[in-house]
Image: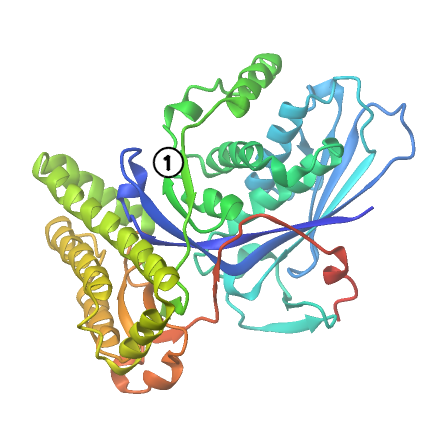
Amino acid sequence: MERAYSAPGKVLLVGGYLVLDPKYDSYVVAVSSRMHAVVSEEKYNETLDGFHIQFTSPQFNNECWNYSVNSQNGYVPVEVSGNRNPFLEKTVLNVLSFIGPASGKTFPNVIKIDIYSDAGYHSQNNSITRSNGLKSFQFHKTGIAQVPKTGLGSSAGLVVVCTTALLSCFLNDNPLLDELDLIHNLSQLSHCQAQGKIGSGFDVAAAVYGSIKYRRFQPDLISRLPTLSSDNYREYRFEMSKLIKSNWNIKHESIVLPAGLRLVLGDVRGGSETVELVKKVKLWYTNNYPRSEEIYNNINEANLSFIDAMLQLQQLQKADNDKYKGLLKAINTGNDQQFKEILHLKAAIAKIRENFRLITQESGADIEPEAQTKLLDACSQLNGVIGGVVPGAGGYDAVSIISTEDTNLNENTTSSEFDSVTWLDLKQEAVGLKLENPEYYRDLS
């Protein structure tokens, strides 16, 4: 029987750089571009020692990754077709290490997982649309490595849906979506190992839990895990299983944009290297401590004020919906100065931007470079727009705008000052990982 799962992409709306530190909260918005996995299994010989796992990407030239798993090598997956994918490799390794293939259970002989991604994750140049009337996907003539990504967290979504798909083959008596913490912990571990570094994890968390107020796990949870080698597989499996079952003490409180408001992501024709930006900011932070910590604390205060303003708007909408509707109309006409909740939100945005411009000047890291400042300022003057920030680590790649749902930025940004930006067709997603209907992925043509 086929099963299908999907997980959303992400935008780090507030919390850039601070998200790396476990003492700060961030706000991560899950977005409507999703990664998908459709899994099926075959059992035909229960006496065989081992099994085969095949991942296929129909959208990207039917690229395949094939893994052989058996007791001879401690159930460590071996890619047999010469096509490496560290994210899939670590996902298979850790799911099997956690399940324990030598436990006496009956396992499938073949597991097949088809991977799909919504259009927002990749450049759509030289692609064609295929649809079955239920879903549409973009198909490319090249492998996935040759198609530029947009930065919505495709690798995190990939690991989450493939972890879930594999677990469903082994934990078929459990309602998997009641096991989100298990899926999260396994996915975080695999994603960090595949990247070769222990990141903040907000992308994986959003893929699992949806739009959230997030505080990261302590990095040493993963760093103290023994490195896997041919002679310590049992030790690795034992320590890894303990880690996955433990409480990681992360914060993932559900939080969504208030009714009538939306996040609009603008793709800017520029480019930034996140690794270099982070390196420069870390150096600046070290060289300017403790003043740099004061600046971080100022940003944190503004981040929390931003989140608090969102909650105030939600409370207003519940307590006095007529007044809230009037507030939305006032935003649309540029006459919202009488609403303290909007002033609170705009002040938080201004403080976040002011402090990141300061870090930009002092560190040399283009978090909010002048071109982005001009673009954000121009957007903030538009009727229907509350304000905006450079999301994530900043740079020239994108802007995030908070507007009313009635505001059409494509119509309102036709002048030359907006030439550099393309508004993406994305929506906020409250829900993270979810079960899908396998029919959505059949007969795409």
In the image shown, does 341 or 213 lie closer to the viewer? Answer: 341
In the image shown, does 249 or 21 lie closer to the viewer? Answer: 249
Give the image location of residue 234, x and y in percent: 62, 13
Residue 15 visible:
yes
Kindly identify the amino acid type of the residue bearing the numbered disc 1. Arg
In the image shown, does 169 or 398 lie closer to the viewer? Answer: 169
Q: Quadrant of residue 263?
A: bottom left
Q: Colour mode?
A: rainbow
In the image shown, does 423 or 29 lie closer to the viewer? Answer: 29
Residue 270 visible:
no
Q: Is residue 32 left or right of residue 293?
A: right
Q: Quadrant of residue 316?
A: bottom left
Give the image location of residue 165, x and y in percent: 68, 42
Give the image location of residue 93, x and y in percent: 62, 30
Who's the residue at 25% across and 47% down the image? 304
Q: Is residue 284 left or right of residue 60?
A: left
**SS at mark 1 in the image:** loop
Who's the residue at 27% across and 45% down the image? 17
Q: How many marks?
A: 1
Q: Is residue 299 left or right of residue 392?
A: left
Q: Give above or below for 223 relative to 429.
A: above
* Residue identified by numbered label 1: 216
Q: Give above or below for 22 relative to 412.
A: above
Give the image location of residue 265, x and y in percent: 39, 66
